[in-house]
């Protein structure tokens, strides 16, 4: 934004800048009158030339030349005979006055040239520093919308007048027609005339600057600068310079460099966005390929068992005893349940890993979710116990902290998460007690609700703890398991990965923690959200 206080300071300093030059001339004339009669005329003339050289360090060129001419005339009037007259006696005095005037003017011209070069160098250093700082600001920006205000502030700081920017929407190609919805305006378009809007579109389409000093449409009072990178323009800027600014070619070049930096930053963000989309697509494709590979491999075993048991019941029903029929029926049920779990986990993993997934969130009670998991687990194992005529029910307990806050979650997904953890504990810690717990915890100044499934089994080896929540990772000892527990531990390796995907979709995370006296604790940390008051929920 244009700083009026800074402008007032600059205005005052411009008046104070010539003051040392004026004081130099005043001191020189005081010395001339003081030395009159004490030194000869030539030495007095040298003092006047020295004063002209020193005063030129601060005075503008026109003022320095004018004062040099006036000083020579006054010197002739006061010190060259006949005094009190502009006439000159003798050629030597005329030569002296001419030499004085010539040396004073040449010195003023040389010093003025050096001052211009020094001012230009300082200006170029300042512009280079501004470009560097602007480039750092653009590099730190991470979204398309935040770049416009940065460029607008830089341009307005240079001109002191309002600047209008028109940028293409992200991922928007240049339309065939001038569509307002295809672009975004930094300050809106209410203050722009139809000609100015058309000029911005023209600048955007041709990626060329036009206006005063550009060589194109110089009759226009405004500057139209394209915001382009290495390719086509991604926007355009409308600037309204003053008459003196419109004649400053270096200022125009600097402003165009700022716009070009902006265009390069937009291209960088667009490239990063496309690269991220490509990475997401690659990850999604890799997950789909791995999912298909898992389905083609790990789903064969339960399908083969179901088909074998069903064909035995169909072909040898009369030869089978009731106990054999019960075992075959239990095999069908068990394998069907395992196949259903693997299918549900695989589908949830594929769905939740997709970008932009939306959950059906509602306020749920942790007690109800844990209760639903307990009922499902007990019902399932009670059915298996009845079918196989053996005690299959593992002791399953719940430990809930009193007065737990409500969860903002998808209840079905959290039920599936805890169900996966319970099934996992029953597979790898079949001889231990299993506990489902819910509690609150503080970490990093934030409150979390921790849902955990804990057991007293062998735990997870240290080498596998960092990979247990990755898809299709089950550990070498599980992948090559044999013996009576091999069927109980089979799977596609997607259960814990689905748990992590569900937790991340809720803004939480999954953790594994070894228990102090042996066993494992699989924990889902969900951020606690303030629940609405009961009167607010009442319709």
Image (spheres, rainbow, N blue to C red):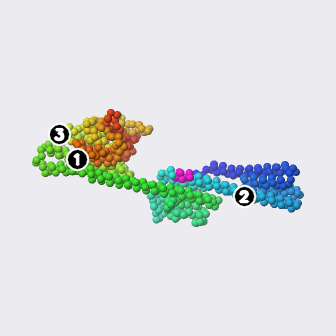
Give the dominant element type of the magenta stretch: helix, strand or loop: helix
The answer to the question of whether label 1 and label 3 lie on touching residues, with beta carbons closer than 8 A, is no
Q: Which residue is mark 3?
A: 389
Magenta stretch holds residue 433: no
Query: In the shown orientation, is residue 38 left or right of residue 456?
Result: right
* Nearer mark to the viewer, of 2 and 3: 2
> Which stretch did the figure color magenta?
132-138
Numbered disc 1: secondary structure: helix
Depicted 404 relative to depicted 82: above or below: above
Q: In the displayed image of the protein, which residue is found farthest to the left?
A: 318
Give the quarter of the figure containing the C terminus. Answer: top left
Q: Which residue is mark 1?
A: 335
How much space separates mark 2 and mark 3, taking CA atoms?
112 Å
Q: Which residue is mark 2?
A: 110
Magenta stretch holds residue 135: yes
For marks 1 and 2 on the same chain, the one whose residue lies earlier in the sequence: 2
For marks 1 and 3 on the same chain, the one whose residue lies earlier in the sequence: 1
Numbered disc 2: secondary structure: helix
* Nearer mark to the viewer, of 1 and 2: 2
Query: In the shown orientation, is residue 57 left or right of residue 516?
Result: right
Across and down, in percent, residue 43 comes to 83, 53
Residue in the picture at 34% in, 35% down: 515
Numbered disc 3: secondary structure: loop
Residue in the picture at 33% in, 48% down: 471
């Amino acid at each position: 934004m244009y700083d009026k206080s800074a402008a007032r300071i600059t205005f005052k300093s411009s008046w104070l800048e010539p003051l040392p030059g004026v004081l130099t001339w005043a001191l020189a004339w005081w010395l001339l009158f003081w030395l009159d009669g004490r030194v000869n005329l030539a030495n007095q003339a040298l003092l006047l030339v020295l004063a002209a050289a020193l005063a030129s360090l601060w005075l503008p060129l026109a003022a320095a030349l004018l004062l040099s001419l006036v000083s020579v005339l006054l010197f002739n009037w006061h010190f060259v005979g006949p005094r009190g007259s502009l006439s000159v006696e003798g050629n030597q005095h005329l030569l002296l006055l001419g030499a004085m005037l010539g040396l004073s003017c040449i010195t003023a011209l040389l010093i003025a040239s050096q001052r211009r070069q020094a001012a230009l160098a300082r200006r170029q250093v300042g512009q280079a520093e501004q470009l560097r700082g602007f480039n750092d600001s653009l590099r730190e920006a991470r979204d398309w919308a935040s770049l416009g205000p940065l460029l607008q502030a830089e341009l307005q700081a240079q001109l002191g007048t309002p600047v209008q920017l028109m940028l293409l929407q992200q991922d928007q190609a240049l339309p065939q027609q001038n569509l307002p919805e295809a672009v975004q305006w930094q300050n809106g378009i209410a203050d722009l005339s139809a000609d100015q809007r058309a000029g911005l579109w023209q600048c955007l389409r041709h990626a060329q600057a036009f206006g005063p000093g550009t060589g194109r449409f110089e009759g226009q009072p405004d500057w139209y600068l394209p915001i382009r990178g290495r390719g086509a323009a991604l926007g355009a800027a409308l600037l309204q310079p003053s008459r003196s600014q419109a004649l400053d070619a270096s200022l125009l070049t600097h402003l165009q460099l700022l716009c070009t930096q902006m265009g390069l930053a937009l291209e960088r963000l667009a490239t990063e966005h496309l690269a991220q989309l490509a990475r997401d697509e690659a990850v999604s494709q890799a997950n789909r390929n791995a999912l298909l590979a898992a389905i083609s491999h790990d789903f064969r075993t339960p399908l083969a068992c179901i088909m074998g048991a069903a064909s035995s019941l169909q072909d040898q029903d009369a030869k089978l005893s009731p106990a054999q029929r019960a075992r075959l029926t239990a095999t069908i049920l068990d394998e069907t349940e395992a196949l259903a779990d693997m299918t549900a986990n695989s589908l949830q993993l594929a769905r939740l890993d997709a970008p932009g997934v939306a959950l059906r969130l509602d306020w749920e009670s942790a007690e109800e979710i844990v209760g639903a998991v307990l009922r499902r687990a007990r019902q399932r194992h009670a059915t298996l116990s009845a079918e196989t005529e053996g005690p299959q029910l593992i002791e399953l307990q719940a430990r809930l902290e009193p007065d737990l806050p409500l969860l903002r979650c998808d209840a079905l997904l959290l039920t599936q998460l805890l169900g996966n953890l319970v099934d996992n504990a029953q597979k790898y810690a079949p001889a231990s007690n299993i506990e489902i717990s819910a509690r609150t915890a503080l970490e990093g100044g934030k409150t979390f609700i921790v849902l955990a499934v804990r057991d007293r089994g062998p735990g997870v080896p240290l080498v596998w703890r960092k990979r247990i929540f990755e898809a299709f990772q089950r550990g070498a000892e599980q992948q090559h398991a044999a013996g009576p527990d091999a069927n109980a531990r089979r799977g596609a390796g997607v259960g814990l990965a689905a748990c992590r995907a569900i937790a991340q979709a809720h803004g939480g995370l999954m953790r594994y923690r070894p228990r102090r006296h042996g066993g494992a604790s699989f924990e889902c940390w969900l951020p606690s959200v303030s629940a609405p008051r009961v009167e607010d929920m009442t319709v």
